[in-house]
Image (cartoon, rainbow, N blue to C red):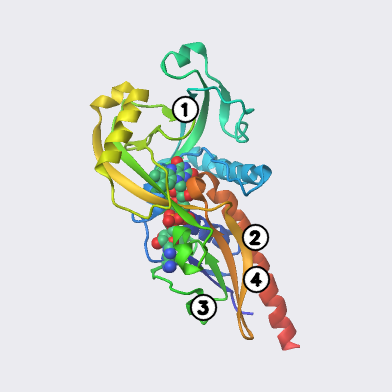
Amino acid sequence: MAAPKVAVVGAGVIGLSTALCIAETCPSCSVTVLSDQFSPNTTSDAAAGMLIPHSCPGTAIHVQKQWFKETFTYLFSISNSAEASEAGIHLIFGWQVYKNTPDETPPFWSDVVLGFRPMSEAELQKFPHHRSGQAFTTLKCDCPLYLLWLEKRLKAAGAQLYTKKVADLWELHHEYDIIVNCAGIGAHQLVGDEKLFPVRGQVLKVHAPWVKNFIRDGDGSTYIYPGIHSVTLGGTREKDCWSLSPDPGTSKDIFDRCCSLEPSLRGAQVIKVKVGLRPSRQCVRLEKEVLSQGEVKLPVVHNYGHGAGGFSLHWGTAIVAARLVGECIAALQSSSSRAKL
Ligand code: FAD
């Protein structure tokens, strides 16, 4: 069989990382990324890019932990290399604070991030409206920089990237042997996944270079995430809302909530407002499917539905998707050698 041709649909953090992982683990295949939007116009560009997982109820905790750990390890090594500033990856220390102390034991990811511990009484004095909290160091991606870095790595690995809206995966079967579906919320229409729904999020990017530590209200409703060029203030979670237009009332509310956590932000200047639709479902769809039209078969690997945690989990799920692509290639090779007999 000639070099297998793989098409990856989608150029957010999931599509680009999956395509890169396939190109690196299967150098004999040709990888093409097809997407109607590239950075800076994807949901992934609107994300805060913090590595703090949200639990997905439909996925076993040990699986979520494995994906997070692989992603953390991968980005940690980038943060510790000469590539760090171009890739937009850095370590960041901060606090997750609670008004009511949670009864749960430490979260499943507490031994993956660095130096996780309860906040000291002295630290808690900074947050007079909160009773308890956790301090730790994690990683943050500057999302547009990281997406551009992934694109650059992909091109260096010989992959092709084309702008194309795919209306039906069967459009691709004449040209490609295997399709990888990383369409994010676009999978709702592309493969008719009714279990996938948007959770709209709005964030502000502000100029506040004096803010160096992250602060996250434990319920995830309000957060302050300092990045390389700006500080991200959030957030909102509006289930089933498809609107991509920023709402000025919401921006004011986010700003006020963040100022009550970090009063020095009152002096910050808003640079821009971003909106994105988190591709949410009970669990990430990470599986093989063989589509058929009569005798014709089309192997597909799905990797979408990362909800609020695409950056936190992307490399872990890319590794699994690349392994599933490897299994599809092996199946194609064995059926092509059987056909020759
Ligand atoms: P996308 O980035 O939406 O990419 C999908 C791609 O598929 C796009 O390129 C699109 O153009 C393409 N596409 C779709 N349909 C088609 C089609 N039919 N044909 C061709 N191309 C198609 N996660 C974290 O881990 N940490 C955070 O701090 C964080 N903060 C967030 C803050 C906000 C405000 C939001 C909205 C999200 C946040 N997230 C965060 C979640 C994260 O953004 C998502 O989980 C992640 O971006 C999903 O990536 P994706 O590649 O699946 O989707």
Q: Are marks 3 and 1 in contact (CB under 8 Å)?
A: no
Circle 3 or circle 4, nearest the eye:
3
Q: Is residue 5 left or right of residue 48?
A: right
Residue identified by numbered label 3: 170
Q: Is residue 20 visible?
A: yes
**If you read the primary sequence from the N terminus, does the residue marked by circle 4 or circle 1 appear first?**
1
Label 2 belongs to which residue? Answer: 323
Q: Earlier in the sequence, mark 3 or mark 4?
A: 3
| Element marked by disc 1 | strand
Query: CB of mark 3 within 8 Å of CB of mark 4?
Result: no
The amino acid type, in three-letter code, at marker 2 is Arg
| Residue 145, visible in the rendered structure | no
**Residue 218, above or below 178:** above
Q: Which mark is residue 329?
A: 4
Question: What mark, if any, has residue 93 been given in the picture?
Answer: 1
Amino acid type for the residue under numbered disc 3: Trp
Earlier in the chain: of badge 1 and badge 2, it is: 1
The image quarter in which residue 301 lies:
bottom right
Give the amino acid type for the residue marked by disc 4 in the picture.
Ile
Label 4 and label 1: CA atoms lie apart by 43 Å
How many neighbours does mark 2 have within 10 angstroms: few (below 14), some (14-19), or many (20 or more)?
Answer: some
Mark 1 is on which residue type? Answer: Phe
What is the C-alpha distance between the residues marked 3 and 4?
Answer: 18 Å
